[in-house]
Amino acid sequence: MMDVINYKLCDDLCSYLTAREQKLCRRRAKVEKLLAWKQKLDDEEKEIERLEKEAMHGVASRRASSVNDSIMSGIIFFIL
């Protein structure tokens, strides 16, 4: 009789632990998916910031070039 109780207890415990393990695996998979998504968004944000800085640098360079061209044109006109 004691063997039947021990077998039943062992079987119940095994079922419980298996179910718990499966739940933990699902939770881990969800969290890993969320972390990967967050990392992807962080990487995308860094890339966008880099592009924005590059664009601003290009605009600033063109403005400086335009101002320099205007100044040089004025100087040449004044000299002539």
Image (cartoon, rainbow, N blue to C red):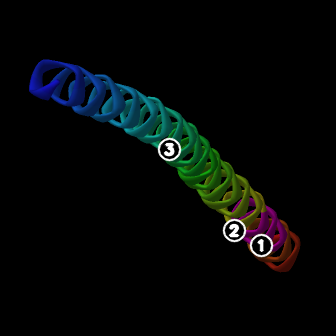
Helix, strand or loop at label 3? It is helix
Q: Of label 1 and label 3, which has the lower sequence position?
A: 3
Please check the rendered image and state whether residue 57 is part of the magenta-colored stretch, yes or no: no
Return the mark for residue 64: 2
Report the amino acid beneath label 2: Ala
Disc 2 from disc 1: Cα separation:
5 Å
Q: Tell us which disc is closer to us: 3 or 2.
A: 3
**Which labelled disc corresponds to residue 67?**
1
| Crowding at mark 2 (Cα within 10 Å: few <14, some 14-19, many 20+) | few
User: Horizontal and vertical percent for residue 75?
Assistant: 76, 75
**Secondary element at image label 2:** helix
Q: Classify the position of the C terminus by image quarter.
A: bottom right
Q: Is residue 62 above or below residue 77?
A: above
Position of residue 54 measured from the top left corner of the image (x, y, whole percent): 63, 51
Q: Are marks 2 and 1 in contact (CB under 8 Å)?
A: yes
User: Closest to the observer: 27 or 43?
Assistant: 27
> Where residue 74 appears, x then y in whole percent?
84, 76
> 13 or 29: nearer the eye?
13
Callout 1 touching callout 3 (CB < 8 Å) = no
What's the amino acid at mark 3? Arg
Label 1 crowding class (10 Å Cα cut-off): few <14, some 14-19, many 20+? few
Q: Position of residue 10 (x, y in %)?
A: 21, 26
* Chain-order first, disc 3 or disc 2: 3
Q: Which quadrant of the figure has residue 1?
A: top left
| Highlighted magenta segment, given as a residue range | 63-70
Q: At 83% across and 80% down in the image, what residue appears?
A: 78
> Label 1 is placed on what type of residue?
Val
Residue at screen point 63% across, 49% down: 41
Quickly name the residue at label 3: 27
Distance from Cα at disc 1 to Cα at disc 3: 60 Å
